[in-house]
Image (cartoon, rainbow, N blue to C red):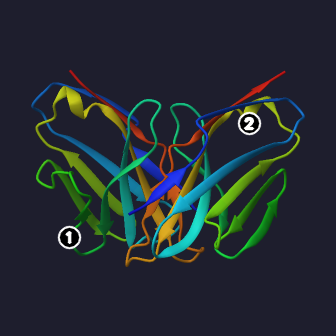
């Protein structure tokens, strides 16, 4: 149980384009999902908290107009990186909070974004 | 503010026992998680402590002392596949119970 999928696993795009990343909880409902970014050899940095049916909450320093988050259902959240630049290249990981299991966050497999 | 400290790297030998420490200073503490992360992969859940004491799960155990702001992850009978980063994360009792991660401890298990 507690499986979270993420798609795509890897994407390469040109500078200035937009990229959408999907995060799905497969066997539980998640009213709250989280989006993280991780640079090489660094820990996870929380970007935003995604809540089903309401606006996302962004961490300080994260541009909400650049990183669009939509939590359309209890099992799906999407992150769209708009007008991507090379400095946006990173490992993006989502997690879903299982409120039925001590509020543990389960992580998706991650998406490696490379912006040329 | 929040401050979570872990050693950067540790090395150990196959079959041995290793203890990875985590200290934290935070307000609104609502539990502490340990995750394992292999290079290039997402973290996987190992353990959760919200009350003081030891939680044992197979070869892995985790301990928490809330008064001291201290936790450790104990790995027994180390295997080569245990070489990974181990992340300590503190949950906050905000409405979303978000996690704040430590920098992670890279563990290298040698033969």
Q: Position of residue B52 (x, y in %)?
A: 72, 74
A20 vs B12, left or right, is left
Q: Which of the chains bears the disc numbered 1?
A: A
Q: Residues within 10 Å of mark 1 (few under 14, many from 20)?
A: few
Q: Compared to A90, does B27 lie above or below?
A: below
Q: Secondary structure at mark 1?
A: loop
Q: Chain of mark 2?
A: B
Kindly identify the residue that appears in the image at 71 percent across and 55 percent down: B72
Figure check: A77 above or below B82: below
- On residue B37, the disc is none
Left or right of B46? Residue B43 is: left
- Residue furthest front in the image: B68
The answer for how far apart the CA atoms under marks 2 and 1 are is 39 Å
Residue B98 percent location from the top left of the image: 42, 66
Residue at the image position 58 percent from the left and 70 percent from the top:
B31
Say whether mark 1 and mark 2 are on the same chain.
Answer: no
Which quarter of the figure has residue B47? bottom right
Q: Secondary structure at mark 2?
A: helix
The residue positioned 72% from the left and 52% from the top of the image is: B73
Q: Quadrant of the N terminus of chain A?
A: bottom right
Q: Which residue is mark 1?
A: A55
The residue carrying mark 2 is B82
Query: With A12 as the anchor, is B21 left or right in this view?
Result: right
Q: Nearer the viewer, mark 2 or mark 1?
A: 2
- A40 horizontally vs A28: left or right: left
Name the spot of residue A50 as percent of width and height, x first. 31, 65
Location of residue A30 by image quarter? bottom left
Expressed as whole percent of the image width and height from the top left, the position of residue B21 reads 68, 50
In the picture, which quadrant includes the C terminus of chain A? top left
- Say whether marks 2 and 1 touch (CB < 8 Å): no
């Amino acid at each position: 149980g507690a499986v979270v999928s993420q798609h795509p696993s890897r994407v390469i795009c040109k500078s200035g384009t937009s990229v959408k990343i999907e995060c799905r909880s497969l066997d539980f409902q998640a009213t709250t999902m989280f989006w993280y970014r991780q640079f090489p050899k660094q820990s996870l940095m929380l970007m935003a908290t995604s809540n089903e049916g309401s606006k996302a909450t962004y961490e300080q320093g994260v541009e909400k107009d650049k990183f669009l988050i939509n939590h359309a259902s209890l099992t799906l959240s999407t992150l769209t990186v708009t007008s991507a630049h090379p400095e946006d290249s990173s490992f993006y990981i989502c997690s879903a909070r299982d409120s039925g299991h001590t509020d543990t966050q389960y992580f998706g497999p991650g998406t490696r974004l490379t912006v040329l | 503010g929040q401050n979570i400290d872990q050693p950067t790297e540790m090395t150990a030998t196959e079959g041995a026992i290793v203890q990875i420490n985590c200290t934290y200073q935070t307000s609104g503490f609502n539990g502490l998680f340990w995750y394992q992360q292999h290079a290039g992969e997402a973290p996987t859940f190992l353990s959760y402590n919200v009350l003081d004491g030891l939680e044992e799960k197979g070869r892995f155990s985790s301990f928490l002392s809330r008064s001291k702001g201290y936790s450790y992850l104990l790995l027994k009978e180390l295997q080569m596949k245990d070489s990974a980063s181990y992340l300590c994360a503190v949950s906050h009792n905000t409405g979303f119970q978000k996690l704040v991660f430590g920098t992670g401890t890279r563990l290298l298990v040698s033969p």
